[in-house]
Image (spheres, helix red, strand yellow):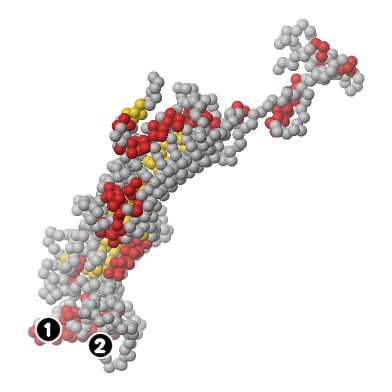
Amino acid sequence: MSRIPQSPSSRPSLKPPATSRGTSTPASRLRTQSARSGASSPTKPLAKPVVSDASAEGTTSTPLSIKEAIALRRAEAKKVQSKINSSDFISLEDASLVPVPKKEEEDVLGRWPIRETIERARSTGNLNLATRSLPCIPSALFEIHLGITPDPLNLVPSEPVLPPTDPSDVPRRKGRGENPAWFEAQDLLVLKLWSNEIVEIQHEISLFGSLKIIDLHQNKLTFLPSTIADLTALTSLDLSYNSLTSLPDNIFALPALTSLNLSHNALTTFPLNAPFASSNTSSRGKHTVGGSFFTPTITRASSPLPLLLVLNISDNKIPASAIDLQFPKTLTKLDLSRNPLGIDELPIQSLMKILGSLPKLKDLRLVGADIGDEAFPATLFSSSPFPSIQILDIGEAKVTRAALEGALKGMKQELSFDFTTEDPPVGVARIIVGKKIIKEAWELELERREKIRRTQHADFDDDWQIPEKPKSNTSVCKPEVVVNNSPRPVAAAPKPRGEIMKEAWEIEAEQGLLTEGGKRRARAAAAAAENKLRAEVGLGSPSDAFDLSSSPKSSLSGPSLTNPQYYSQNTQTLTLPPSSPPTKVATHTRTFSLASPSKLAFSSPSLRTDDLAVPTPTLPLSVIVTQPFAQTLRVLLLFNRRLDKTFALPNVDDQDSFLPHLEELSLEGCGLADLVQVARHAAGGASTPHRSSERILPLISGLFPSLRTLDLSHNALTSASFTNDDLSGLILRSPGRHGLRHLRLRGNAISELAGFQGLAETFKGNRQVPEWKLEELDIRDNEIGKLPPELGLLPMDVFLVDGNT
């Protein structure tokens, strides 16, 4: 470190300081080697210099050492930074104050200053100046990126001056480097200026010819410069939430624009064809602007916005008559909500006809538009309208559902008038009419099931009468039903009433079968009547008791399951009632009769026992295949059928599968084990059925090739049933099999999942297995101690495992 130069007259005479004892410092302490300086003096004073009184009287100021000068300079700099605006700043006599320029106020969000953000955009090509309270685009953008000064604006006479970037911020702000060289600078591609107070845009904006995205929503623009249409590389333009009343004509000739948002403005017209309607064709094709050697060439489109995909002009003041009908064929989403479209009847019909012919339109919004049923007459569309539509939202308008159904009757898609937050499935067009009520998927499923349940019951009129009960010796007070005392118009003819549906307990109550004693008496009477009939025809007593499951093809008519109590025609569902082994009571040694029900008992009008007509096996397939609905049955529900845990199958040559359209089978709570008893009946039905034990999963997969849902919950199945081969034959799709989608195994005795682990091995190194269709697997409430990690490879939507050990 070098000394501060001083004049010879001001240099003090240096003397070694005296010690406390009055002795001088030894000379050895004041000597140093002079190898660095090369001085001839053998000694050099190193101690702190002491100024003598004689020399001090001849000088005007006290000289400072090097350390004191450095310390004063540092203290001076700190005071300047902390008290730049303070008037009571006191510095040393020889301290020179350095004026510090006024800085830009610190951003509360910690963002870079505006000028520094603009400078950084030269390296990235992306400029975001949102929420900066700017009255216009900063002129510094044009000066830094283009090297020009834009013309002053009429609506912004005094633009706020941006302070220059402070070099002292360089060490504090990490990542800031020098400005890029001219060959490293990037063209400006993205310009975001939303949520400002911009009232006017400089016409020099067209010089940013590489701009692709401009976001100016939530500003105060009332018009746009015509040069904005010269940005031919523009793909996305957002001008929503402004006060625009008109648009430049050439903006509809942008060749690369794919997204245009003009919502929440004050537009009254939408002239799509304005750049092409005039007779002057100079605006079409290539248009050259400028007059220098480097004249840019601006290529405009030859049709209105040829690549436009999304158009939003909602919340404006545009009637249907002020919209040009030359919409681009590439349009996929259009929003015309809350516009007075339906002021005139003819223009709105023409608009709907043009929109219905767009081949790629998937989403059309007309929420709150001033339109009614006159916009959708029954003869509006001559061909299939809206070929690709998925959502047609006409909520909060005056259009009714009946008018829409009449106008859209020729659509190829299925119409759905339920609104949910999920996307509609393929082939379904969601139509929203009237007040919008958002429903979840489970609500729609609940309504669908409720509708199915109601269709299974008869539809009664308001003037129904209580049916007469059978007479008995016991006097019963008959209730009187009063419908209405007011006079009613005389009907021309009584309406036909549907058949009264009765539950099983009501039928048993009418026949006195609510107790075990009543059931024993009914079976005894049926057996006595059969013996009497056989004695009259000379057949004698029967050798074997009649078994419904052993003779499905006998000469007499077998049990009929077409009763609406069991079979639903609307849903093609067969539900057999539960059956359990007879219970024993402590007061009786035998609580059920060994007498079998006879065939005559089921046809006798005095003893209608529909519950006794149901076959006793858990899966009476030999009886089901004889029913008229066997070829169309889709759902078979067999809950808690534990009386006879067998599968009664017909013995048909060269046929191992039955019920070709069965998609759902439920055997919940039937007490089935790994091996199930199978009874195969002979073709004639006279011989004793052949019985065997077979594995349950291969048996079910072979019987029902179209099965998609299998419910084996609350049985006695173990891990031995779920081998790799058995699961592959049940779940995977194969020739002749559709593949299982839902498998429910809740409440069994499964302890390990080795079979499922083997299936998961097929997905290693292969993300897609075309044969795999399973979407849901329920293994709750079993005895599984650990899940194999390979199960994570199985592509399933629902996997339930709670309740295990």
The tag on residue 38 is: none
355 to 250, vertically: above or below: below
Between disc 2 and disc 1, whose residue precedes?
Answer: 2
492 to 651, vertically: above or below: below
Please name the amino acid that badge 2 sits on: Pro
Instruction: Report which residue position mark 2 lands on.
Output: 470
- Horizontally, residue 28 falls left or right of residue 258, namely right
At mark 2, the secondary structure is loop
* Image x and y of residue 764, in percent: 33, 43
Label 2 CA crowd tier, 10 Å (few <14, some 14–19, many 20+): few
Query: In this rendering, which labeled residue sits more in front, label 2 or label 1?
Result: 2
* Image x and y of residue 800, in percent: 38, 57
Instruction: Report if residue 291 is visible in the image.
Output: yes
Please name the amino acid that badge 1 sits on: Arg
In front: 17, or 157? 157
- Horizontally, residue 627 falls left or right of residue 590, namely left
User: Residue at point 43% right, 43% down?
Assistant: 245
In front: 446, or 656? 446
Instruction: Report which residue position mark 1 lands on.
Output: 534
- Horizontally, residue 12 falls left or right of residue 591, namely right
Give how far apart the Cα atoms at labels 2 and 1 are: 31 Å
User: Residue at point 38% right, 48% down?
Assistant: 318
* Image x and y of residue 614, in percent: 23, 73
Label 1 CA crowd tier, 10 Å (few <14, some 14–19, many 20+): some
